[in-house]
Amino acid sequence: MKTKTLLAFSGGLDTSYCVLWLREQGREVHTVTVNTGGFDPDELGRIEKLAHDLGATTHTTIDAREELFRDYLRFLIAGNVLRGGLYPLSVSAERVCQARRVVSHALESSAEALAHGSTGAGNDQVRFDVAFRVLAPQLEIVTPIRDLAPSRADERKFLADRG
């Protein structure tokens, strides 16, 4: 029986690699994109088509734009919360919002594992991992890009070799 794995999917190189790699590990891959305002309808359509073309069993797009503003950004704006007095801390809040929605979808769809394509280089991996572990400690967390550390060239070759 294949492990039902929900992948936070942006449609970029890393998460595209993850879909195929997870499938090759014998997992049933379901993708989810959480739109917090960075995607227009055409891009969301392209992402969904790509997920299906890569072999995702299902793809879901979640509109979290209102939630991001209501539950996160309005407080940061009202507090004029800036890193170094210059940089708005909106991206970190966006990732937490996305991770929470991914977990909610995983629990609603009876997933057995969560996956993301964050590398080991930045803070996004921490935001996703912490939210996943706190909100769904019973689910396995799979991080192919961080664990395998493929180069971008290796990822492109892996995808090209599989059509």
Image (cartoon, grey):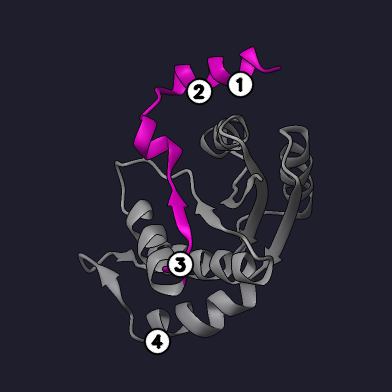
Query: Badges 2 and 3: C-beta atoms under 8 Å apart?
Result: no
Decide: marks 2, 1 in contact (CB < 8 A)?
yes
Q: Which mark is residue 155?
A: 2
Distance from Cα at disc 3 to Cα at disc 4: 36 Å
User: Is disc 1 placed on a helix, strand or loop?
Assistant: helix
| Crowd tier of the residue under label 4, counting other residues whose Cα lies within 10 Å: few below 14, some 14–19, many 20 or above | few
| SS label for mark 2 | helix
Q: Looking at the image, is mark 4 or mark 1 earlier in the sequence?
A: 4
First-in-chain label (2 vs 3): 3
Q: CA distance from mark 4 to mark 1?
A: 44 Å
Report how far apart the C-alphas of labels 2 and 3 lie in the structure: 30 Å
How crowded pointer 1 is (Cα within 10 Å; few <14, some 14-19, many 20+) is rated as: some
Judged left or right of residue 48, residue 154 is: left
Q: Which residue is mark 3?
A: 138
Mark identifier at residue 159: 1
User: As displayed, is residue 33 above or below residue 27?
Assistant: below
Q: CA distance from mark 2 to mark 4?
A: 42 Å
Q: Secondary structure at mark 4?
A: helix
Q: Is residue 102 above or below residue 78?
A: above
**Span colored in magenta:** 136-163
Specify whether residue 148 is painted magenta: yes
Q: Quadrant of residue 75?
A: bottom left
Q: Position of residue 36 (x, y in %)?
A: 59, 65
Task: Relative to 99, say whether 74 is above or below.
Answer: below
Disc with the residue nearer the chain's start (3 vs 4): 4
